[in-house]
Image: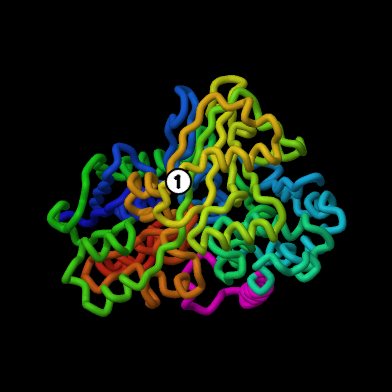
Amino acid sequence: MIDATVVGAGPNGLAAAVTLAAAGLEVQLIERSERVGGGMSSAELTLPGFVHDVCSAVHPGALASPFFRSWGLERRVAMAVPDASYAHPLDDRPAAIAYLDLERTVAELGPDGPGWRRFVGPLVEHFAGVSDFTGGPLLRWPSDLTAATLYGMRALRFAAFGAGTASPRALGFATEAGSALSAGTSAHTVARLDRLGTAGAGLLLAAFGHTVGYPVPVGGSQAIADALAADVVERGGTIRLGEHVSGPGDIEPSRVVILDTSPEFLASYAGDRLPAGYRRALGRYRRGDGVAKVDFATSAPIPWADARVGAAPTVHLGGTRAEIAAAEAEVAAGRIPDRPYVLLTQPTVIDPSRAPEGRHTVWAYTHVPAGSDADLSDTITAQIERFAPGFRDTILASAHRSAAQLAHENPNDPGGEMMGGAVTIPQLIARPVLSATPWRTPVAGLYLGSAATPPGPSTHGMNGWYAAATALRDHFGLREAPFAV
């Protein structure tokens, strides 16, 4: 019997494996794909020499992550942090841009500057407390009650006015710029804007923009996955690729098994060994809507109508807050909007290594009902062209993946949903079940360490670290896990 097996080499599986290996355990990591990374991988999806991120592309959560800081991410992987964290183009007016420098953001927002400072400034000031509160299970007393209160009160306000029908003044802004800028971060969650979980996620992403920034790994997200994998092997662990696991019989007997998988897979893997009540709780766990993604290889930078947008690797497209709220409500109702919210990254503006000289890569996705097989290439292209006339003329090649295709490629994303489950307050508290230690399952030695556990989605590795730390405490008597957070 070996010490530990980790199933799934996504960011959380890799985090769990390196934590266990650093504790001196005999660890094997098994991945069905031919490469590590899962949603944190990169590939030539369009033309030779053009490196595209398969899923996660920009990593503020990684720089804010206590696990990654302790592991030494910035020492192991070059992270390019832009001056402009994210941009939000608007029709017939200057774009709204969130800079790493909060005061520069306030100055360029003009009439909305004071409102933006009131909105995000206290969270930046109390960022350590906000990061701690959102970086673990919600069933605990916050270490910084002031930070948690400031964060919670703002989330409540933005959820109350998130439907988009309220005027910008109801949110504390004088014009559309500030409210649109806040809507762009909230819409990352693939959910209606008038939900508390959506508002909370948007606030955290806004605070990231003025603290750790919105970095891209030089060479692609695969660089982080490869660095983690190399450290696992260096510490004596074994990585087995191209192996499908469906049940305990597919792996060697292990004292501990950690699944970086969906709750659906956990239920299938453990079967009748799980108590009926626990299985029913897993069955009640809800998935969110999906995404449809297009990668572009281009001959030139995107010709944004506001040239300043070209300095931001992350761009939110969709117009005003009201437009974005309407588009997200359409998706939630099972329809595909004509003018959707589009999350776009243009990494080569800060990392030219991803494309041949003078060329560029563009990554863009929009939200769709779960399981949709619709090709949204034209819709996404039109939304980019809306704010960057002439973009079509720069396209050398493109590659589209529908929500259905993404689900087929990654079993952790059923329906093409990338959040590990709907981002709602009930599901952030009970993720995937109501428990003080939700990484531990009722089966002795079996743990869940995916985005379907606290602290939820994002490339921060904390889900895997928590699962590994719990296993080390339960079975190996180690009270403080490596890379303690």
Observer able to see residue 70:
no
Residue 2: % across, % down = 17, 54
**Which residue ends up furthest to the top in the rendered image?**
357
The question of residue 142 being in magenta is answered with: yes
Residue 222: % across, % down = 44, 38
Answer few, some or many: residues within 10 Å of disc 1's Cα (few below 14, many 20 plus, some between 14 and 19): some
Residue at image point 73% right, 60% down: 179
Is residue 231 shown left or right of residue 90? Answer: left
Residue 21: % across, % down = 31, 51
**Tag 1: amino acid:** Ala
Residue 405 falls in image quadrant? top left
Secondary structure, magenta segment, majority class: helix
Is residue 25 shown left or right of residue 295? Answer: left
Residue at image point 46% right, 38% down: 400
Q: In the rendered image, which quarter contains the N terminus?
A: bottom left
Is residue 79 shown left or right of residue 386? Answer: left
For mark 1, give the secondary structure. Answer: loop
Residue at image point 37% right, 77% down: 435
Residue 12: % across, % down = 39, 54
Instruction: Point out the stretch of residues depicted in magenta.
Output: 134-158
Taking depth in this image into account, of 72 and 289 the one nearest to the observer is 289
Residue at image point 51% right, 73% down: 425
78, above or below 7, in the image = above
Taking depth in this image into account, of 360 and 385 the one nearest to the observer is 385
Residue 237 falls in image quadrant? top left
The number of numbered badges drawn on the structure is 1
For label 1, the residue is 374
Observer able to see residue 229:
yes
The question of residue 310 being in magenta is answered with: no
**Which residue ends up furthest to the right in the rendered image?**
111
176, above or below 433, in the image = above
